[in-house]
Amino acid sequence: MDSIEDVYKQYAKSVYKFLLSKTFDSHLAEELTQETFFQAVKSIHKFQKPMKEVMYLRITGDLSFKEIGEILGKNENWARVTFYRGKEKLIKEVKKHE
């Protein structure tokens, strides 16, 4: 299972490049990249238990929806829908802090 740090290492470069293309400022893009990940983790911590668990298992555990459903005693579709709703909620939370 990957840690949040591993997820950051995996995606930070892509996020940084995107932000650099928008800001044209390397220092600002780096700060915004860190802030984006911080807000995402902070927001996930606020989620209710089942959604939080699905988000962490999917993002840091790199598990399939079927595996997540089995772990949580639910089905694959439930895990998929819960992750989708969590992702949408996360996007809204992060946008609030922009």
Image: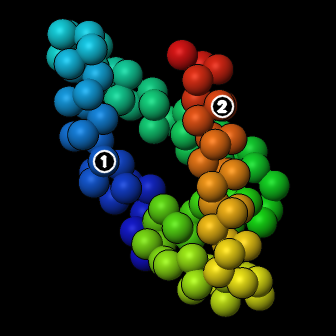
- Residue 6: x and y in percent read 34, 59
Q: Name the residue carrying label 1.
A: 11
Helix, strand or loop status at disc 2: helix
Q: State whether residue 3 is above or below residue 22.
A: below
The quadrant of the image that shows the C terminus is: top right
Evaluate whether residue 54 shows in this view: no
Residue at image position (58%, 23%) is 95
Q: Is residue 31 left or right of residue 79?
A: left
Helix, strand or loop status at disc 1: helix
Residue at image position (44%, 56%) is 4
For badge 1, the amino acid type reads Tyr
Residue at image position (64%, 20%) is 96
Extreme-top residue of the structure? 24
- Residue 45: x and y in percent read 68, 48
Disc 2 from disc 1: Cα separation: 19 Å
Q: Name the residue carrying label 2.
A: 93
Front in this rendered view, residue 38 or 69: 69
Q: State whether residue 42 is above or below residue 51.
A: above
